[in-house]
Image (cartoon, rainbow, N blue to C red):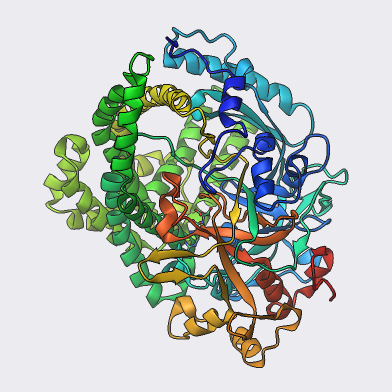
């Protein structure tokens, strides 16, 4: 009998991942350093390069042209001078920060015509993966099987910290993380070089970069020119350095050549990027919670907020700019959850998993794995009301902007209080600097808050989501403070009137004149008290239970994962996504979303013209694009479509397994050249984070030729093309 809890060795896991294992059609997000195990399959599907071309620690490889962009997107280097491509929605926050009613780069686009005009972005970083490595033995050194999960966590943490410290001294700008794969059956070190001077070079107007807006988001056919361009800067030695006018464009080890060969159904495609999070191996009970409980509740709460935002955004251009980024964020997950819950139901994933679990349990008799599923099942039962409360709280009380702001201002007082408590207040110079930190902290937080704050939206949202909170959560799962408040005010609406009227936080002048002596003005403020009471209740009554049960669940999943690998020894298991670099491969292919309907795999400018409508915000394109279309002035970007029209390609879909975080990822062809930029998935396939279905799951990509066409013909920034290297036919200018 096998002993559970014993560590599956790295070798055994690699076996499970080995090339002999079969993967289902195009499903999978593979680790680049182990890609040699899949390279034969990739080559049999058309790929013409080798494993070392994808990932190598000895020579420049494609991985050296891929970056983690910010903390949740991917980008790719496309010139020897550090030019970087990502999505418009990934650069959205930066474009928005540089925008005002006078210079509305979101609306009008932005193009730096010289290097001097490229705009720095505080806080934005891009990270190149230097190397990744299996460090399981080192991380579990000192772990013995009878340790508790929290003792094990301490061992893992201590070993990880030591390793991170050791490797980050190897050079400048290094950042390392140790990540658990397969629920901690395996650990990998990821060493990154992080650049922090990343400047905005260009972005199309939103009417191109966000064409179709939230109406078309997560949908096919799609016509969104979802790209923006940045440039990485480095110090004179090509090392990472904070922004400085003396920095110079970064010289990459590797950059992508741009393919001008076009996109055809059946073409091999490969996505290199940073998918954020998937849960492919969870049990039926976890899936049921997502599709039947969590997604529907979150969708309902967000629907209320979105309706309110829309009402005010439609009335005012200023409010539209203020809430554009927030609104897109709220709408995005809202729509994805709808596709996800629908997809899980359509596929019958809960029943399919139950059936799998039945077979697993039969097999498990006498192996030591027989108790894992019943134990998981009962933990899920215990977790559900707490988890539901946690998610509900996040989507309701935690979404009140005024209360969140009040709490972040309070942090400045706490900092200052810590300084007073430190006994250093007798030193005048130290006092001065603590005061300066206080004032600049307040002013920075307040300015960025008020720039994008519109109280009527916040207040109406407060009434809506807090009313739902009162109705939908059992009384035992509501804070006493909240129940007392409702009793006192009689209704949420009356409470909101009082809170928004009496809070100092709706008054920017008052907030900007706060001094360290005003702590009572904050701690007695109704918005602060509201946010803080909820936070305290959550931290005391809800979070610890979620944390405890979740850690027991993770521990059981470690066992269940290992059991699944033994149960199906022939199958190739890829680790769930965790924002580490992955390779997914597949092909350009259409799909059939419903009986009698077949979607072609590519879209063109003709589709943009079909949707064009100056009356509809999401479909109102720039006049320049209309003119170019009527003159068919496409230059070298013209193609002939299946109907014989002369047009320009826009988007295409493929069968690659991607997730949130893969936005901006390079879509690479059989020769390793760039054919597009990944930016979305189709609505019918968003359950791919839980279950991948080859018939419905498609990733949506922007055709690189549309990017070039927009830069060249619409933006008049053709000089950027001079930096790029083209591959394939039609490379003549
Ligand atoms: N659905 C894509 C992704 O998850 C694009 C999101 C941005 N666009 C939007 N309309 N909200 O990131
Ligand atoms: N749009 C997503 C992103 O931002 C990609 C996806 O979820 O397919 O990463």
Residue at image position (47%, 67%) is: 220
Q: Position of residue 358 (x, y in %)?
A: 30, 30
Residue at image position (44%, 70%) is: 598
Residue at image position (81%, 49%) is: 252
Q: Position of residue 415 (x, y in %)?
A: 50, 34
In the image, residue 266 above or below residue 429: below
Q: Position of residue 47 (x, y in %)?
A: 70, 51
Query: In front here: 664 or 207?
Result: 664
Residue at image position (54%, 34%) is: 572
Residue 706 visible somewhere in the drawing: yes
Residue 539 visible somewhere in the drawing: no
Left or right of 173: which side holds 74? left
Query: In front here: 208 or 233?
Result: 208
Left or right of 154: which side holds 478? left
- Location of the C terminus by quadrant is bottom right
Q: Position of residue 704 (x, y in %)?
A: 68, 66
Left or right of 356: which side holds 158? right
């Amino acid at each position: 009998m096998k002993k559970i809890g014993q560590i599956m060795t790295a070798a055994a896991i690699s076996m499970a991942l080995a090339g002999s294992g079969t993967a289902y059609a195009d499903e999978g997000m593979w680790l680049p350093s182990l890609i040699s195990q899949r390279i034969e399959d990739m080559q049999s599907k058309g790929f013409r390069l080798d494993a070392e071309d994808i990932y190598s620690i000895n020579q420049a490889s494609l991985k050296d042209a891929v970056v983690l962009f910010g903390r949740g997107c991917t980008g790719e280097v496309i010139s020897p001078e550090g030019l970087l491509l990502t999505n418009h929605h990934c650069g959205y926050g930066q474009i928005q920060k540089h925008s005002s009613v006078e210079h509305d780069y979101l609306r009008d686009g932005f193009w730096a015509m010289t290097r001097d005009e490229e705009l720095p972005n505080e806080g934005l970083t891009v990270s190149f993966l230097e190397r990744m490595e299996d460090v399981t033995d080192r991380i579990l050194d000192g772990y013995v099987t009878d340790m508790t999960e929290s003792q094990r966590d301490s061992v893992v943490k201590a070993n990880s910290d030591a390793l991170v410290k050791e490797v980050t001294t190897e050079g400048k700008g290094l950042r390392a993380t140790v990540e658990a794969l397969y629920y901690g059956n395996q650990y990998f070190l990821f060493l990154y070089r992080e650049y922090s001077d990343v400047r905005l070079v260009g972005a199309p107007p939103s009417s191109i970069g966000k064409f179709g807006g939230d109406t078309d988001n997560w949908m096919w056919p799609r016509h969104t020119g979802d790209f923006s361009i940045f440039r990485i800067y480095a110090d004179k030695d090509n090392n990472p350095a904070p922004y400085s006018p003396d920095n110079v464009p970064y010289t990459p080890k590797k950059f992508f050549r741009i393919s001008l060969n076009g996109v055809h159904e059946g073409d091999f495609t490969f996505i290199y990027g940073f998918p954020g999070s998937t849960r492919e191996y969870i049990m039926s009970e976890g899936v049921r919670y997502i599709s039947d409980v969590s997604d529907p509740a979150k969708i309902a709460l967000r629907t209320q907020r979105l309706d309110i935002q829309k009402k005010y955004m439609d009335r005012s251009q200023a409010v539209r700019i203020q809430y554009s980024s927030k609104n897109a964020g709220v709408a995005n997950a809202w729509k994805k959850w709808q596709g996800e819950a629908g997809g899980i139901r359509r596929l019958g994933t809960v029943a399919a998993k139950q059936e799998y679990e039945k077979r697993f349990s039969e097999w498990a008799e006498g192996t030591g794995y027989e108790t894992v599923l019943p134990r998981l099942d009962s933990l899920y039962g215990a977790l559900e009301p707490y988890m539901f409360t946690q998610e509900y709280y996040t989507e309701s009380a935690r979404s009140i902007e005024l209360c969140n702001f009040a709490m972040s201002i309070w942090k400045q007082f706490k900092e200052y209080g810590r300084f007073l408590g430190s006994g250093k207040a007798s030193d005048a110079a130290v006092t001065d600097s603590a005061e300066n930190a206080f004032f600049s902290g307040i002013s920075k937080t307040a300015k960025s808050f008020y720039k994008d704050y519109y109280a009527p939206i916040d207040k109406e949202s407060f009434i809506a989501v807090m009313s739902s909170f009162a109705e939908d959560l059992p009384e035992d799962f509501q804070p006493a403070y909240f129940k007392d408040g409702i009793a006192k005010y009689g209704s949420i609406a009356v409470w909101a009137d009082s809170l928004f009227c009496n809070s100092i936080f709706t008054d920017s002048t008052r907030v900007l004149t706060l001094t360290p002596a005003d702590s009572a003005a904050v701690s007695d403020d109704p918005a602060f008290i509201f946010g803080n009471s909820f936070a305290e209740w959550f931290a005391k009554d809800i979070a610890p239970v979620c944390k405890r049960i979740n850690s027991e669940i993770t521990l059981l999943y470690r066992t269940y994962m290992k059991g699944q690998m033994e149960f199906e020894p022939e199958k190739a298991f890829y680790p769930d996504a965790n924002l580490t670099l992955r390779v997914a491969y597949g092909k350009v292919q259409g799909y059939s979303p419903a009986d009698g309907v077949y979607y072609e795999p590519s879209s063109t400018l003709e589709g943009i013209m079909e949707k064009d409508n100056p009356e509809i915000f999401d479909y109102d394109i720039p006049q320049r694009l209309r003119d170019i279309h009527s003159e068919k002035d496409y230059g070298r970007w013209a193609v002939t479509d299946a109907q014989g029209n002369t047009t320009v390609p826009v988007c295409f879909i493929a069968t690659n397994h991607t997730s949130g975080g893969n936005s901006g990822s390079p879509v690479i062809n059989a020769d390793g050249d760039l054919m597009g930029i990944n930016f979305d998935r189709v609505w019918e396939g968003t359950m791919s984070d839980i279950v991948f279905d080859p018939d419905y799951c498609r990733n949506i990509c922007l055709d690189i030729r549309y990017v070039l066409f927009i830069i060249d013909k619409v933006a008049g920034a053709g000089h950027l093309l001079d930096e790029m290297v083209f591959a394939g036919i039609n490379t003549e200018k």
